[in-house]
Image (cartoon, grey):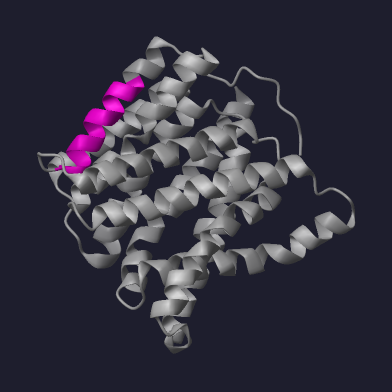
Amino acid sequence: MKRELYGASALLLTTLLWGSSFPVIKLVMSEISGYTYTWIRSSLALLILLPYVLHIRSIGKLNGKTVKGGLTAGIAYALGLWLQGWGTSYTTASNSAFITGLNVVFVHTYVAFVLKDYSWKLALSLTLSIVGLYMLTVPSTGFNIGDFLVLLGAIMWAAQIIIIDRYSSSNPFVFTFFEMIPALVFAIPSLLSENVLAINLNVIGLLLYLAFFCSVLAFSLQVYGQRFVNPAVAAIIFLLEPVFAALFAHALLAETFNAEQALGATLILAAMFISTINHEKKQKLNPF
């Protein structure tokens, strides 16, 4: 139970950091394109982690499993990011937020039918979290090509959680280093269409915040936290990301946060507490 508490706390901090990124991303995206934002943020994260990874390699502790896991998770992450951005351009932000959160359904399906580690508490938490997510995001009715693309992105986000569950015994910082590499492919369209040398220092400062706190620290905490937490529970915890995002946007950007959204956030919190009660990961865990 203690190690699950450590894991859940790490994932909660991960989600808080990701939530804090949304107001910052909004400011960054007013100055540069999504392609440029993605590859520069990933590049800065790689530069931050590079000395540590070189040290790990020099002492002979860089193993192939960590490299493979990081790159695989990175491909899912990069595809999820791309599909979400592409799809959002054809649908509403509320629809995108709700559909992205549906990755929790895919993770729960995997846990139930592949890992066979499911319970009524997880089923109840899934129901509460989906209702809460709907109230928080208030998506519009209808379904279009944008919604479909975002749904494909949600499948990629679910895959990232499942992949990390498989490789969670890896060194978190080394894993995160290799997870950031696939996103560098976005440098190709960025450099072909944008003058990156014209980016101002304020934007670089914001990108540094995102790279260190929301990439290096947050993704490393995700790997560590999922070592102790069932992936279905992790997916529920990650649904607090739009809750934290809404709270940060309200505090920093004066965006509205109404009673219906507050009730939705409360339901997601309730789902998190129900899912984490006595649902420790079954498999044996290996230190990194």
Q: Nearer the viewer, residue 189 or 131?
A: 189
Up-down: is 188 above or below 100?
below
Query: Quick one: which residue is furthest to the bottom in this view?
Result: 198
Quarter of the image that includes the N terminus: top right
Write the residue at 55% across / 49% down: 74
Marks counted in the figure total 0
Q: Is residue 44 left or right of residue 197?
A: right
In the rendering, at what x and y percent does residue 141 appear?
9, 39
Up-down: is 266 above or below 193?
above
In the rendering, at what x and y percent does residue 106 appear?
39, 28
Q: Nearer the viewer, residue 118 or 143?
A: 143
Write the residue at 59% across / 44% down: 72
Q: Is residue 216 left or right of residue 14?
A: right
Up-down: is 251 above or below 232?
below
Instruction: Please check the rendered image and state whether residue 169 is part of the magenta-colored stretch, yes or no.
Output: no
In the rendering, at what x and y percent does residue 6 appear?
60, 34
In the rendering, at what x and y percent does residue 225 appear?
58, 37
Q: Nearer the viewer, residue 51 or 66?
A: 66
Query: Residues in magenta?
Result: 125-139
Q: Nearer the viewer, residue 209 or 147?
A: 147
Write the residue at 62% across / 31% down: 166
Q: Is residue 256 left or right of residue 82?
A: left
